Amino acid sequence: MTVEDLHKALGDKREGLRAFRFGAAGSRSRNVREGRTLRREIAQIMTELRARELAAKK
């Protein structure tokens, strides 16, 4: 994926996590793993972006 695609995916995942959290506040969520997987995917994308940033500096 390109850097722009990663930034777009990061925004989508963050929005999904926000929606999950606000949806869970009103009622019990059936899929409790969704929050964990979204956080994990966000971290993976951020790690890849940071690795590419450091590689570009060298």
Image: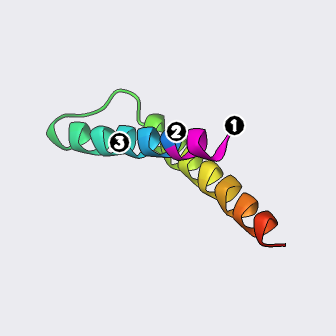
Distance CA(mark 1)–CA(mark 3): 20 Å
Q: Quadrant of residue 15?
A: top left
Distance CA(mark 2)–CA(mark 1): 10 Å
- Of 1 and 41, nearer the camera is 1
Label 3 or label 2, whichever comes before in sequence order:
2
Amino acid type at image mark 1:
Met
Give residue 9's mark.
2
- Left or right relative to 55: residue 47: left
Label 1 belongs to which residue?
Answer: 1
Disc 2 to disc 1: CB gap under 8 Å: yes
Q: Please report the residue visible at 28 percent of the width from the left and 39 percent of the height from the top.
A: 19
Circle 2 sits in a helix, a strand or a loop, which is it? helix
- Left or right relative to 26: residue 56: right
- Range shown magenta: 1-7
Q: Residue furthest top?
A: 30
**Residue 34, position as x, y percentages in the image:** 45, 35
Q: Residue furthest left?
A: 26
Q: Please report the residue visible at 67 percent of the width from the left and 41 percent of the height from the top.
A: 2
Circle 3 sits in a helix, a strand or a loop, which is it? helix
Disc 3 to disc 2: CB gap under 8 Å: no
The chief SS type of the magenta part is helix
**Residue 36, position as x, y percentages in the image:** 50, 45
User: Considering only vertical position in the picture, is 31 above or below 14?
Assistant: above
* Crowd band around label 1 with a 10 angstrom C-alpha radius: few (<14), some (14–19), many (20+): few
Q: Please report the residue visible at 41 percent of the width from the left and 36 percent of the height from the top.
A: 32
Amino acid type at image mark 2:
Ala
Label 3 belongs to which residue?
Answer: 15
